Amino acid sequence: MEALSKLIYITATDPDPDWEAEFNRWYDEEHIPNLRSVPGYFSARRYVAVEGEPKYMAIYEIASMDAYRSPEHDRLANTDWTERMRPHFRGRGLVFYEQVFPHDGLIHGAAWGQPEGGFLTVRLDVAPDREQDFNAWYDQEHLAALAAVPGVIAVRRFRATESGGPKYMAVYHLTAPEVPASGAWSKAADTPWSERVRPSFTTRWRTLYRPWEPVTTASSSARQAPAG
């Protein structure tokens, strides 16, 4: 595991239940492979929620905004299959984030080098007059404390580059979704400084995911709209 870029964007979606199977085929068979082939796209990964919402999240690491705005992106992202799917899922916003801590790379956790089996995102807005203390808490105490918890592979933190979602996001790569339920996690998270900062949160969106495992189909004939 490595950090391929400091610039990422995320999309979070809930598909209509009758279209969920095709939604996943579209993502796995076309959308993710297409975006991975766009110049300037370093990675594209999908996750499915085990706690919280929206149900699905995709995260993309890109070289610059030029990659997202390129003709290649527009051509490969806006296909006939994409147009057919768009009325059948509800998006929770596409948000661009730039890494703010650590300056480069990842904070290696206690389980560094182990396979990823869980992924936690915590997205926050904070009262403007408390932002300085909030950022100091995250960078000087909170991330390092949680990185030391057994089962945490790596952590890093981001700030939105434009409006459209919570301003701050922390991501935690985990060996399993159960890691944040551990006593060690609670002990690391519940400190006097944490108690002082938490009342300043104005938005808190916490979702626990596991990596999505692509569904394989026998043939492209599976790309059919649900009956009825």
Image (cartoon, helix red, strand yellow):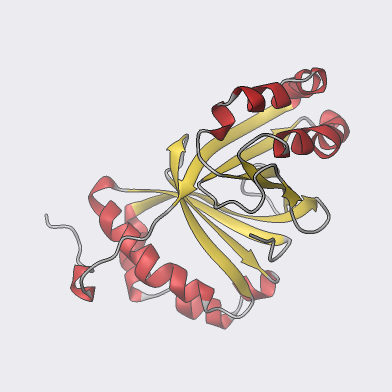
Rendered residue at 64%/39% (across/down): 123
Seen from this angle, which residue lies furthest left? 228
Q: How many marks?
A: 0
The spot of residue 89 in percent (x, y) is 36, 52
Reply above or below: 26 against 183: below
Rendered residue at 64%/76% (across/down): 40
| Camera-nearest residue between 134 and 138 | 138
179 lies left or right of 20: right
Among the 4 quarters of the image, the one containing residue 203: top right
| Camera-nearest residue between 47 and 182 | 182
Among the 4 quarters of the image, the one containing residue 168: top right
Reply above or below: 213 against 32: above
Rendered residue at 27%/55% (across/down): 21
189 lies left or right of 54: right
Reply above or below: 105 against 83: above
Rendered residue at 55%/78% (across/down): 38
* Quadrant location, the C terminus: bottom left
The spot of residue 136 in percent (x, y) is 87, 35
* Quadrant location, the N terminus: bottom right
The spot of residue 41 in percent (x, y) is 60, 73
| Camera-nearest residue between 12 and 142 | 142
The spot of residue 93 in percent (x, y) is 53, 50
50 lies left or right of 98: left
